Image (tube, rainbow, N blue to C red):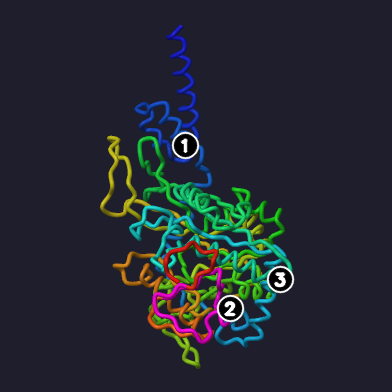
Amino acid sequence: MGKEVSATTKYAKMTVYDELYERLSKVGQEHLLKFWDELTLDQQEILVRDIDELNLKELKLYFERATASLQENGIKLDDRMQPVPEENLVSIERTAEERLKAYEAEGMRQISAGHVAVLLMAGGQGTRLGFAHPKGMYDVGLPSNKSLFRLQAERIQKLEELAYAATGSRGNITWYIMTSEHTIQPTNEYFMANNYFGLKRENIILFEQGSLPCFDYDGRIILDQKHRVARAPDGNGGLYRALKQQGILDDIKKRGILYLHAHSVDNILIKVADPVFIGYCVQENADCAAKVVEKSHPNEAIGVVAIVDGKNQVVEYSEISAKTAEMRNPDGRLTFSAGNICNHFFSAAFLHQIGDTYEKELKLHVAKKKIPFVDNSGKRITPEKPNGIKIEKFVFDVFEFAQKFVAMEVPRHIEFSALKNADSAGKDCPATARADLARLHKRYIEAAGGIVHGEECEISPFISYAGENLAPLVASKSYTSPVYLRSNRDPYHGHL
C-alpha cells in the first residue's frame, strides 16, 4: 500500500514538473527548474507559485521591449524638445491672488462633494535612512515627533474641515496607499496601532505594488534561491496596473471619486489633496497634470517636464546636453525649468483609460544591477558588479496619453523637500527636511503677525493646513525656539 501512495505522489510530482517544463521551455526559461529534484515539497510549491505569477508570454515581450529601450539610452533629445507652452502652465508666484482663490474655492467644492482622493506612493523602505521600516513611518525629528504618515493624515483631516467651513457640505477624502509586498503588513499594523490617526478606517485603502522578475543579459530569469525567482518592484509606474488588478479603479468608481492627487510619501512639505491644484486642474478640464518646481540651476540632476515630438513627458537630466540645459528665455529664466517632483493630478476617467488601454504601452526603463543569484552548484552568490537587469515603469510615463495636460509651478521652499538620504549626505535628508519645514512654519507665523526667535518651529496641521487662520492665535506674540503650536487634538510631546 505504501509503495502505491509513493508511486502516485511521484506521478503527481512528475506531472507538475512536466507541465511546468513544457510551459517554460516554450519561452526559454526551463532553467528555473534545474534544482527541482533537490527541493522539498514545500519548496516545490513555492517555486510553482512564483512561476505561476509570471505572465510568461508577456515577459518575453517585456525583455525585448526593455532591451530595445536600453539601446535608446544615451540618445540626446535636444532637437526634439520644447518647453511646456505658457497656456498649459500656471505659476503660483506669478498668478494673481484672486485667480488662485478661485482655484482654491473650486478645489474645496470638489472635496466637500467627496470627489477627491489621494494616491500615496509609499512602497519604499527607510533603508537609506538606516530605518528598517516603511519610510512613511519615519520621524525626521520634529518637536512633535510626528511621522510622515501622521503629518499627511492630519493634513487630510484639516482639509476636510476647511472644505466643510468653506461650503457647508462635509465630504471625505479617500486615501489610497500603494505599498510593496514588504511594507504592506507593517504599514497596516502602524495605521491600526495609531487608530488611523483619527481618519475613518473605511476611507484608508492599502494596496500592493506589483513586481517583475530580474533577467540576466540574455533574457533568462534569475533564480534568487533554488526555489525562488529573483524579483524587484516594478517602479512607481506599477501604480496603474496595481490600481486595476487590485480593484482600486472599481472602488474609485463606486465611491464617485472624480479627481485624484498622487504623490510620493517622502516629501515632508506635501500639500496633500491641495485644493488650489485640484481646482486649477478641474477648471482646465485636465486629464493629467504635474506640479513642478523651477530648477535651481542648469545642472540640477532633476527631470524636467517638456514636450518631445509633440508629446508631454519627463526628460531625464542625462537625456539632454549641457547646452540645452543652460538655454534661457529673454527674461533670464531657464527655458527647460519645470523640475519634476513626483506630484501629479489625474482625473478618474483618465486612470480608467490607462488601466483599460495605455498601461500595456507604458515605456519600460532598464537598470543594470548587482542581482544575487544561485550558481550552477546551487550556491547563492552576491555579485560585485552588475550581472543583470531590473525593469521599471515610471509614474510620469502616462503624460503622453493625456488629451489635456497642464502643469503648475510651485515655490520649492513651500512645497518640496524630499527625504532620500541619511544626514551624512547633507541634502534631501532628515536634517534638511526638518529645517525646510521649520523655515516654512516660521514664515507662516511671521506673516500672521507673530515673531519667532530661533529656527526650530512647527505648526500642527490641526492648527493650520498651509498658514491660514493663524493671525488670531499668533498676532503680536513673541515665541522662542523650539516652537510647537499644537492643538488639543495632538498627542502631547512636551513642547508648547
Q: Is residue 397 visible?
A: no
Indicate the amino acid at tag 3: Arg
Q: Which mark is residue 109?
A: 3
Circle 2: element type:
loop
Q: Earlier in the sequence, mark 2 or mark 3?
A: 3
For the point 53% across and 78% down, the residue is 410
Q: Residues within 10 Å of mark 1 (few under 14, many from 20)?
A: some
Q: Give the Cα distance between marks 1 and 3.
A: 54 Å
Q: Which mark is residue 430?
A: none
Q: Which mark is residue 24?
A: 1
Q: Which mark is residue 468?
A: 2
Residue 161 % position (x, y): 64, 68
Circle 3: element type:
helix
Residue 75 % position (x, y): 42, 70
Q: Residue 78 or 156: which is nearer the viewer?
A: 156
Image quadrant of residue 278?
A: bottom right
Residue 3 % position (x, y): 43, 9
- Between circles 1 and 3, the one closer to the viewer is 3
For the point 55% across and 51% down, the residue is 206
Tag 2 near tag 3, CB within 8 Å: no
Q: Earlier in the sequence, mark 1 or mark 2?
A: 1
For the point 51% across and 87% down, the residue is 476
